[in-house]
Amino acid sequence: MLTWVRQAQARLMVAALVCVAAWEIGVLLSARQSEPSAEQWRAAAAAIPSTLQADQLIVFAPPWLDPLGRRWLGERMTPQQVARMDTARFREIWEVSVRGAVAKDVASATPASEQRFGPLRVRRFSREAAAVTWSLADAGHICEIDFEPRRGVPLDLQTSMGQTLRSFPGVTLGTELQAYAGLADYQKRARNRSKAFIQVLVDGVEVTRGFAGNDDGWVALPTVATAAGTHDVAISARVQEPDGAVDLSVCVAAEGRTRSR
Amino acid sequence: MIGTRDRLVALLIGVAVTAIVAVASTTQGIVRDEAYYMKAGELHVRYYEDALSGRLTHPLSDQAIVPFWAYVAEHPPLLPTLYGVSWRVLHRCTCALDGAWHPEAARITGGQHTTLAVLSELSAFRLPTAIFFGWMCALVYLFFIAALGSRWGALAAALLMFAQPRAFFHAQTASFDLPVATLWLATTVAYWRALDSKRWWPAVATGILCGLCLATKLQSFLLPVALGLHCAWLVVRRRTAEVHAATRSFLMMALIGPGLLFALWPWLWHDTFARLGYYLRFHLEHVHYNFEYLGRNFNQPPYPWHEPLGMLLFTAPVVMLVLAAGGIVSLAWPADRWQDDGRSTRALLLVAGAVPVGVFLAGRQPIYGETKHWLATMPFLALAGGYAFDRLRDGLWRELRVMPGTARDIALSICLIVVAAAPSVVETYHSHPYGLSHYNALAGGPPGGADLGMNRQFWGYSVKGLLPWLNATLPPGAVLYPHDWNHDSWLLYERGGALRPDIVEAGGVAGSDAALVIHEKHFNEFDFQIWEEYGHVQPAQVLTLDGVPLVSIYLRRTDASR
């Protein structure tokens, strides 16, 4: 056997090279063919309700598909939905994906339906949705957090002793309060050498807290149970662990919610 | 030994490569800095024209030099000057009619430039880089024959050099990275030839090429380091004659190199050290642009040490990488023919190929240039690939005794060349004209590169693919926010008739009727700005490569269009 291999060494290596060459060409051709056609996009779009309610959401996977997905389905999406805080308020999520990718919003969920249109896969997910009683995002704008869109309110800190507080008096809370925070603006993150410490206060009492650093992305603060009704909410941010330049553009979002169960 | 037939074949390779690249470049978008270099080219050539015709009364004075040479003083002069010369000789001239688009000092107000009028302005500017690429491929062919002896191997090496998506991309543009890689190879070859000679002229040739290299781009400062390492190896091997020959080359490089740089760069003729200092400081203190690698956006050091290797692994054709790896291994365990190589050719191939990419492994150099800053490594990988090809060809010829010797040799060689080169050619063809967005089969093609979070593109070059759509869709006088599409590139498109002249360039999203986003990770925030300003998230058109978005364009909706 070894003798035969030695005698056929060049032939075996050339055979291997032929295989690599064929594989290389095949991968490139298949990459080109895996691009969804306009007809396939139209068919996928037709599988999704043409008018979506506020509690229905379309997501794309992998993330780089997003601009193309919005090209075909963007009239059914709003900036508020795309720059959402999270998906708790959505009872139905439609995922459009290629290459077997799964959107992180539905990563562990089981689809209620699945359809294929060439390389496009459309899956529908049904879930229990929370009723939103108050959303801070309504008062904010879209921030870039970890290169993703998040609608929130900015709290800027430029000095190591800096502290910012935003108050929202008389808001209607449900049975729970969820807050998120992240550092906006990648250029500031590149300069910044500190963390932000965020506190959420309800009626003057701290109910939840968290930290946001350069590489932390969009941080979910621990969810808190609240008494349904009208409350004063305040969110403060201050500098933590300054280790050089302080340039924090903290973006915060919060929702008062009531869950059906 | 190189014969006349080899030189003819090399000439054919050079001409064919130049012609293919020149034709392909007509569909290639304008990259960010090209417009600046073209403008500099017009100024530089006008200086020589005015100086030689006597229009400049004191052409050597600083007052005469500054208007033509202060622009793009952060780069050496050779390539901008060649771009200018090529443009001046070959372009179809409407310069008096479109004078506003030309740099002020180089404008003509009436008549026409006397030219051969065979190329568009853009093609004429870009032609020198295409010629450099042709020269590089021809040089790979000739050097392979001289150093490694096989013509089939040389042909394979030249093809492997030619069919590389990223090198092919850069060869189409009026920029310096491909030319400096060519001159790096040419100087190395000249140095290698000089090692075998007791005369001075090969050393003089090395010095001249080194000077041209210095006059092209900053990487050239590393060339003496690479050749110095090789010379040190010769010293270790006690190759006295070769060390003496290398010393002659270094002497000529030290004398002729800076002298040629000075002679070719009038900007340095006054206030020399301050201006040289500015040139060096510009690069040593260069801003770190954004670059996405493996899903992370980098814009300051430390960078991952493996970034250049990762980019190489995911951008070069796979068969070429496999052959190059095989060639490096084969060269590391040499056959008999290497035993008496007094010039330590293998060591030279190693250092001259490794130094350009090696300096980026420290993780401190800016990485925004993807593969372009170490393109000089690629011809050496192609040579190694050619060597592996030749060993395979040789082995196959011995094993397959199905035909008489010569016929078998030709048949096997042609078949093997098809196997070795076809994937690279397919890949290069496939990538055009979006070579900076292309990733190889190891990455999974462009979609695989996007999955891996690899840099999508830079320089805003891909917008050219959307120009027909913009011209057909935007209403008259539309205000367009161009994002990272460079102002000077916009002007060049307009000047060349590729963009409607009534479209107005906006400084920001606010007040625009349409807005572009060129997709790179750090540019995502521009999408968000547009959503806020336009009130919707739906691009009207998305330019893609294999389904991967490169550029999106949004239209502001009027009440009627909502």
Image: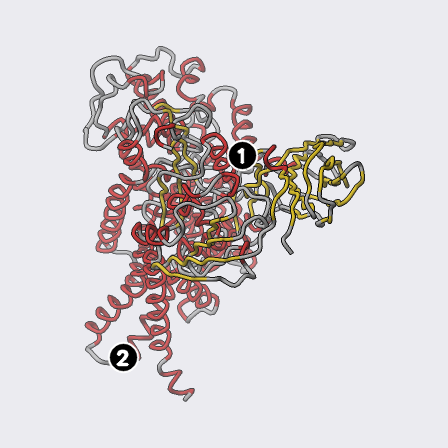
Q: How much space separates mark 2 and mark 1, taking CA atoms?
A: 55 Å
Give the quadrant of residue B469. Answer: top left
Residue B191, how many percent across, how many down?
A: 43, 48
Foreground pick, B69 / A34: A34
Question: What's the mark number on residue A68?
Answer: none
Residue ID for mark 2: B400
How many C-alpha atoms fall within 10 Å of the one at disc 1: few (<14), some, or many (≥20)?
few
- Answer with left or right where residue B357 lies relative to residue A179: left
How many C-alpha atoms fall within 10 Å of the one at disc 2: few (<14), some, or many (≥20)?
few
Foreground pick, A167 / B385: A167
Q: Chain of mark 2?
A: B
Q: Amino acid at mark 2?
A: Leu
Q: Can the viewer see residue B190 in this picture? A: no
Q: Can the viewer see residue A32 in this picture? A: yes
Does mark 1 fall on the same chain as mark 2?
Answer: yes
Residue B219, how many percent across, how many down?
A: 49, 41
Residue ID for mark 1: B283
- Judge whether B77 appears above or below B458 on screen: above
Residue A231, how many percent across, how many down?
A: 73, 37
Residue B86, how many percent across, how many down?
A: 28, 31
Q: Residue furthest right?
A: A205
Residue shown at 31%/75% (left/top)?
A: B396
Foreground pick, A46 / B540: A46
Give the quadrant of residue A253. Answer: top right
